[in-house]
């Protein structure tokens, strides 16, 4: 789940300010980079999920985290929202000028693997990642692709 979910949400104005500061790269913690949060909202269900787009990669993000993290509310999973939130987040990444984005994912996280593949992810590498005690996969999604194949 994106780390921004752990932010204190009251007072709400302060949360909005913090999120917009993060997007501007203002006052962010050491080692972090400018990042934008997006909420997937359904008219009836309300907030469905959240994504976080890192504007640039650091060596640490290249290893784990990549450009985009996302999560869907547990009660609303397996309805296509995961594919949807990544699709919208990729459009935001393209608007930011990124030509390709890196996604990292636990190999056993079948839902996330399928979300990435459904959005055109190409597996670059996978290796055991001791801090998480699991095999991590890295996928690239090409945003410059014109869709004509
Ligand atoms: C991963 C996650 C975002 C998927 O969201 P979702 O809304 O359930 O995804 P979708 O409904 O779009 O499902 C996409 C595909 O994955 C499949 N899928 C989803 N969850 C699955 C699961 N637990 N087991 C097997 N398949 C699963 C769906 O059936 C669908 O299959 P299809 O390609 O045949 O259509 C969600 O499970 C989640 O928030 N997990 C916790 C946070 C997380 O892991 N984020 C990703 C970090 S890398």
Image: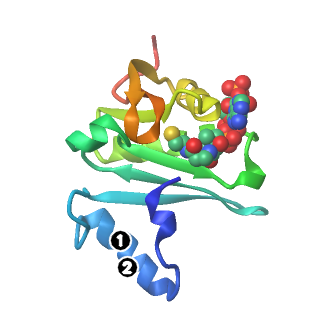
Relative side of 80 to 119, left or right: right
Residue drawn 48% across the image and 32% down it: 134
Q: Which residue is mark 2?
A: 17
Query: Residue 57: horizontal and vertical position, in percent?
Result: 25, 43
Residue drawn 23% across the image and 64% down it: 25
Q: Are marks 2 and 1 in contact (CB under 8 Å)?
A: yes
Q: Quadrant of ligand 1?
A: top right
Q: Which residue is mark 1?
A: 20
| Few, some or many residues within 10 Å of mark 2 (<14, 14–19, 20+) | few
Element on which disc 1 rests: helix
Furthest toward the top, the residue is 149
Residue drawn 64% across the image and 33% down it: 111
Residue drawn 45% across the image and 79% down it: 15
Res. 18 in view: yes
Camera-nearest residue between 94 and 109: 109
Tell me: residue 100, above or below residue 9.
above
Relative side of 115 to 57, left or right: right
| Few, some or many residues within 10 Å of mark 1 (<14, 14–19, 20+) | some
């Amino acid at each position: 789940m994106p780390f921004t979910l752990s932010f204190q949400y009251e007072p709400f104005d302060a949360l909005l300010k913090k999120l917009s500061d993060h997007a501007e790269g203002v006052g962010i913690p050491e080692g972090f980079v400018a990042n934008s949060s997006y909420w997937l909202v359904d008219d009836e269900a309300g907030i469905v999920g959240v994504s976080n787009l890192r504007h640039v990669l650091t060596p640490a993000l290249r290893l784990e985290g990549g450009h985009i993290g996302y999560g869907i509310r547990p009660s609303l999973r397996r309805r296509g929202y995961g594919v949807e939130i990544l699709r919208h987040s990729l459009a935001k990444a393209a608007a930011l000028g990124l030509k390709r984005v890196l996604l990292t994912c636990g190999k056993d996280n079948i839902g996330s693997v399928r979300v990435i593949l459904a959005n055109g992810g190409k597996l670059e590498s996978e290796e055991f990642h001791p801090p998480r005690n699991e095999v991590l996969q890295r996928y690239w999604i090409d945003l410059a692709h014109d869709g004509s194949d």
